[in-house]
Amino acid sequence: PSDIPKRQNLEMKLSLIDEDTSKEEYSYKSPDIHEEEAKQLFVYSSISKLRLSTCAIGEMSGLRGRSKRHFQHMSSRPKKTPPFSRFPNLVSLNLSHNEIFRVKSAFAGLSSLPMLSSIDLSYNRLSRLDDVFMFIGNVTELILTGNEITSTRGLDRLFSLEHLSLSENKIHNLSDIVGVAKLPFLMKLDLKDNPLMMDDTDLCRIKVFNLFREVRCKNMPKNATYRDMQSL
């Protein structure tokens, strides 16, 4: 596409996100370029799928944009926005096999992407997801395999979720997943290789199914029919 530099490959590395930083900063200095026009110079509107897997992306990779402190000696320059907000038509994002451990870094800028429906954050270092719903409320698929998650707190407010993978995490108790049982559209939940599933896999699966049925029955409207209950 014409708005992607030719030297870049769609299987890009993190360099694409902060590509030509010097040029971008220069554009803000130029009095001939309006601030809003300058911001649009590096928007990749043609990209719908972005893979940044195994790029050693960590907390220092600039996912959250630059702090105001970076610009305190340059009052005419605005705060740099989170890089993922430059992909307004992004549908799928793969950040697997990196070193991300904070929610604010993993999901920075994603709240401004209304078309984003699938996120793969497998094999990072995430342990808590309390505020995740503030960033990705419309996502239908979330892959969190191979992290350090102990509870689904925060995930229970992602009401659009249809597929959630929590395999290879550190979930020990059935009570730790009660919240996601309330999600109305969740149809696929992967919990394998968690401590919860280690003893008797078949028995644990039955307990999970019963939990979902019980929770969803409690949340059914008063005028629900027997057929509605059978569909659970």
Image (spheres, rainbow, N blue to C red):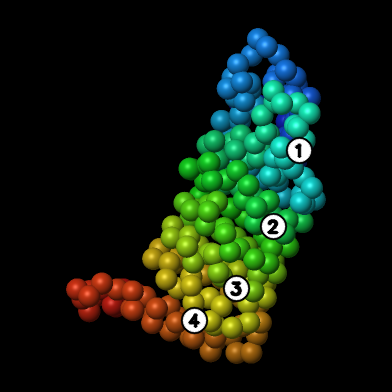
Give the residue furthest to the top. Answer: 32
- Which labelled disc corresponds to residue 69? 1
Q: Is residue 23 visible?
A: yes
Q: Amino acid at mark 4?
A: Val
Q: Nearer the viewer, mark 2 or mark 1?
A: 1
Left or right, residue 220 beside residue 74: left
Of residues 227 and 20, which is closer to you in this image?
20
**Distance from the alpha carbon under mark 3 to that under mark 1:** 35 Å
Q: Which residue is mark 2?
A: 102
Q: Which residue is mark 3?
A: 151
Left or right, residue 11 beside residue 1: right
Examine the rendered structure and indicate whether residue 222 appears above or below residue 124: below
Tag 1 or tag 2, which sits nearer the N-term? 1
Q: Amino acid at mark 2?
A: Arg
Label 1: which secondary element: helix
Q: Label 4 crowding class (10 Å Cα cut-off): few <14, some 14-19, many 20+?
A: some
Q: Nearer the viewer, mark 4 or mark 2?
A: 2
Tag 4 or tag 1, which sits nearer the N-term? 1
Label 3: which secondary element: loop
Q: Amino acid at mark 3?
A: Ser
Q: Which residue is mark 4?
A: 208
Tag 3 or tag 2, which sits nearer the N-term? 2
**Distance from the alpha carbon under mark 2 to that under mark 1:** 21 Å
Q: Label 3 crowding class (10 Å Cα cut-off): few <14, some 14-19, many 20+?
A: many
**Residue 26: percent from the left, percent from the top?**
75, 19
Tell me the residue at 70%/69% (across/down). 148
**Distance from the alpha carbon under mark 4 to that under mark 2:** 28 Å
